Amino acid sequence: MTSSELQTPPLDAARLLAERGDLEGAAAILAELAADPDEPDRPQAAVGLAVVLEQRGDVEAARAAARTALATGHPEFAAQAACHLAQGFEREGRAEQARAAWQAVLGVGTPAYLPLAHLALGRLAVRAQDPDEAVAEFRAAMEAGDEAVGAHAAQQLAELMMEHGEPGAAAEVLLDALEFAPAGEVPGLRVQLGIAHLELACAEFAESLEGGADPRTGALAIELLARTLPLRGRADDADRVWTYGLEHGDETLAAEVRLRYHRDA
């Protein structure tokens, strides 16, 4: 070891060793720092140790190191440690442990990490089939100040709303997100907004039929509904709509539908 290396601060020395592939050497330095309750760099060292140990494949020891960092309550490194734990549990499909770790991120309260935690908690709530919690967490993620994370939360919230038959509410969420989303997120939001509008259009066409439209208007609604549904992956529903129109008891309406059905043949 050269004299310059001897003068290198321990954290920097551990980082250099890790970059060179000497994970064992880096872990030894970081473990010593993390074990000292009076060491001012203990929170950062414990997080670094968790990362190095995970790279070495020692998952449980890595989690123990992350918990050490979390216990320090450091606004930056405790939050990083909780994220490390949460992401690992999610990868393993351990939803309850992941949820607890993301809640720990919220407990640390560091603003930079709150959007990611709310987004993850919303995602976990969807998997747990708890739509009310999911909506609350996605909205919290949208309001937490990170524009990119907020845009992703808006997309997931809108998707959830459309799955529950609320395309109008989904469209409102997406329009709100377009007000703050980064440029790279805008195309995806606009596509999803278009999908919400398709769902709204289908609902309006169906409502027109149920509202007693005259034969010409009814036939137009049937055609538009039947031609729009396949765009949403609902070809079978489209066939049923055509059949409804073609076999309708009002012969004038049925004749109009036949003309519309066969015009592209």
Image (cartoon, rainbow, N blue to C red):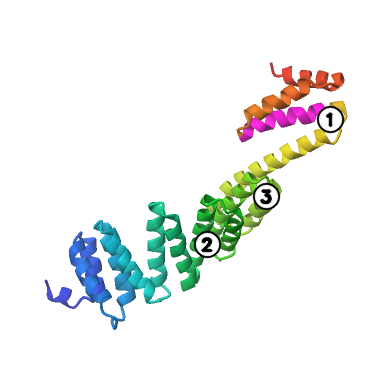
Q: Earlier in the sequence, mark 1 or mark 3?
A: 3
Q: Position of residue 104 (x, y in %)?
A: 45, 68
| Disc 2 + disc 1, Cβ < 8 Å | no
Q: Which residue is mark 2?
A: 118
Q: CA distance from mark 1 to mark 3?
A: 26 Å
The tag on residue 217 is 1
Q: Which residue is mark 3?
A: 171
Q: Is residue 231 magenta?
A: yes
Where, quadrant-wise, is the C terminus in this rendering? Answer: top right
Magenta-colored segment: predominant secondary structure: helix
Residue at x-position 54% and y-position 57%: 122
Tell how many labels: 3
- Secondary structure at badge 2 equals helix
Q: CA distance from mark 2 to mark 1?
A: 46 Å
Q: Position of residue 93 (x, y in %)?
A: 41, 51
Q: Amino acid at mark 1?
A: Thr
Q: Earlier in the sequence, mark 2 or mark 3?
A: 2
Towards the viewer: 148 or 123 = 123
Local packing at callout 3 (Cα closer than 10 Å; few below 14, some 14-19, many 20+) is: many
Q: Earlier in the sequence, mark 2 or mark 1?
A: 2
- Secondary structure at badge 3 equals helix
Is 141 left or right of 52, judged from the image as shown? right
Q: CA distance from mark 2 to mark 3?
A: 21 Å
Q: Position of residue 243 (x, y in %)?
A: 73, 22
Q: Which region of the structure is painted magenta?
A: 218-232
Q: Amino acid at mark 2?
A: His
- Secondary structure at badge 1 equals helix
The residue positioned farthest toward the bottom in the image shown: 38
Is 239 left or right of 64, judged from the image as shown? right
Residue at x-position 67% and y-position 49%: 171
